[in-house]
Image (cartoon, rainbow, N blue to C red):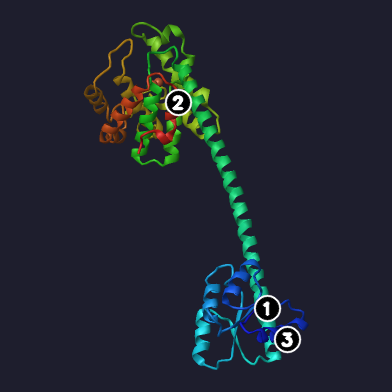
């Protein structure tokens, strides 16, 4: 595009370039140039400086301020020899100069080299845009895929959790009026595990695994499980088998929380001093998950009303657990229990408020108040 207010100058430059095969657009002044470039952007602009209304500097400033035009190379064509004009032209963003009268060879050389620069710039801009759109496309695909995976994962997790709770409920079905026993004892177990400092994976596994602690009660005959009144020695020895049965029901799984469920079923009645069952193991030989669940299980059982006993108060319950520290319970777990008593009571009360709702969204770890 040749921008010049004098028709002779325009004709002269046109005449020099057209034989070379260039298409030449013309603009008669700054306004004309600014409006024409919006319709069809040229690859190069030859700009006169001294023009009425708007001089060349002003036109260049406006062109360079528009992002889609800023990469068009501009050659200032001027009769002026003034160094200040050249500096100013550079400052507003012109790319090169030609002095009038324009030399044919010089014009052609400038035009050729600047068009090469323009072609290279165009190529880079296209390439960048292609890259950007390809990256955006792949990012979107990746994002969609990961949303789908997360969704599937969370559905699977909900399904596993629901299965566990229903299985655990089956075991408790004929048993004492346990209310929300498995819900509160599992949440308290998870809270204790978290406060002990176990990592979040283990905490989550304990939350999922602990509801199955009494699953072996399925194998205990009704005459013992539902007996009105105290059990005799023989009945007790059968009742104690629920730990072994639970271990057998869950044994051999390669799923983490089921393996942990096996461990908990087998060890939640072991005692720190070795007087528990089924194996009479003691101290740190009892797996930590079993020691944690022992405290949570007894806490909830004491706090709850059962057909054969009233609910104890918090003070009575805490006294019993304190008294069992070092004999029944791991003293470290009891210490953590006492340090976090407030939160545990809150958790227990919340679980009671969910009377007999065995499954809803609140069983998800996300909404369980363990932090
Ligand atoms: Fe049990
Ligand atoms: Fe229990």
- Give residue 299's position: percent from left, percent from top: 31, 24
| Residue 102 in view in this figure | yes
Mark 2 or 1: in front is: 1
SS under mark 3 = helix
Mark 3 or 2: in front is: 3
| 30 vs 335: above or below | below
- Quadrant, the N terminus: bottom right
- Quadrant, the C terminus: top left
- Give residue 5's position: percent from left, percent from top: 61, 82
Q: Would you name the residue on which mark 1 appears? A: 115
- Give residue 61's position: percent from left, percent from top: 52, 76
SS under mark 2 = loop
Question: Residue shown at 55%/68% (left/top)?
Answer: 67
Q: Nearer the viewer, residue 84 or 137?
A: 84
Which disc, if any, is residue 173? none
- Give residue 333's position: percent from left, percent from top: 31, 34
Q: CA distance from mark 3 to mark 2?
A: 83 Å
Q: Would you name the residue on which mark 2 appears? A: 360
Q: CA distance from mark 2 to mark 1?
A: 69 Å
Q: Residues within 10 Å of mark 3 (few under 14, many from 20)?
A: some
Q: Quadrant of residue 64?
A: bottom right
Q: Earlier in the sequence, mark 3 or mark 1?
A: 3
Question: Residue shown at 68%/90% (left/top)?
Answer: 106
Q: Nearer the viewer, residue 146 or 320?
A: 146
Q: Earlier in the sequence, mark 2 or mark 1?
A: 1
Q: Would you name the residue on which mark 3 appears? A: 16
Q: CA distance from mark 3 to mark 1?
A: 16 Å
Is the CB of mark 1 within 8 Å of ligand 2? no
| Residue 71 in view in this figure | no
């Amino acid at each position: 595009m040749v921008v010049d207010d004098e028709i002779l100058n325009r004709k002269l430059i046109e005449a020099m370039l057209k034989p070379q095969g260039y298409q030449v657009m013309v603009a008669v002044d700054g306004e004309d140039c600014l409006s024409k470039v919006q319709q069809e952007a040229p690859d190069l602009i030859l700009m006169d400086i001294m023009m009425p209304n708007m001089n060349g500097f002003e036109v260049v400033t406006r062109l360079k301020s528009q992002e889609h035009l800023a990469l068009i190379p501009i050659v200032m064509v001027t009769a002026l020899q003034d160094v200040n004009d050249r500096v100013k032209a550079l400052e507003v963003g012109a790319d090169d100069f030609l002095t009038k009268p324009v030399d044919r060879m010089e014009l052609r050389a400038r035009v050729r080299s600047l068009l090469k620069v323009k072609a290279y710039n165009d190529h880079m801009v296209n390439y960048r845009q292609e890259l950007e759109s390809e990256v955006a496309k792949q990012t979107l695909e990746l994002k969609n895929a990961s949303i789908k995976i997360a969704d599937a994962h969370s559905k699977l997790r909900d399904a596993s959790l629901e299965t566990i709770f229903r299985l655990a409920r089956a075991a408790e079905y004929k048993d004492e009026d346990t209310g929300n026993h498995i819900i509160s004892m599992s949440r308290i177990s998870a809270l204790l595990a978290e406060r002990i400092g176990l990592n979040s994976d283990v905490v989550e596994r304990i939350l999922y695994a602990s509801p199955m602690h009494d699953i072996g009660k399925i194998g205990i005959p009704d005459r013992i499980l539902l007996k009105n009144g105290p059990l005799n020695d023989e009945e007790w020895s059968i009742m104690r088998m629920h730990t072994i049965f639970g271990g057998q029901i869950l044994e051999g799984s390669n799923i983490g929380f089921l393996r942990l469920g096996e461990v908990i079923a087998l060890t939640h009645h072991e005692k720190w001093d070795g007087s528990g069952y089924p194996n009479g193991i003691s101290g740190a030989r009892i797996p930590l998950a079993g020691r944690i669940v022992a405290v949570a299980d007894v806490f909830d059982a004491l706090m709850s009303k059962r057909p054969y006993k009233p609910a104890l108060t918090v003070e009575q319950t805490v006294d019993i657990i304190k008294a069992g520290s070092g004999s029944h319970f791991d003293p470290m777990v009891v210490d953590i229990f006492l340090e976090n008593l407030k939160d545990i009571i809150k958790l227990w009360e919340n679980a009671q408020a969910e009377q007999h709702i065995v499954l809803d969204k609140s069983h998800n770890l996300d909404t369980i108040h363990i932090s």
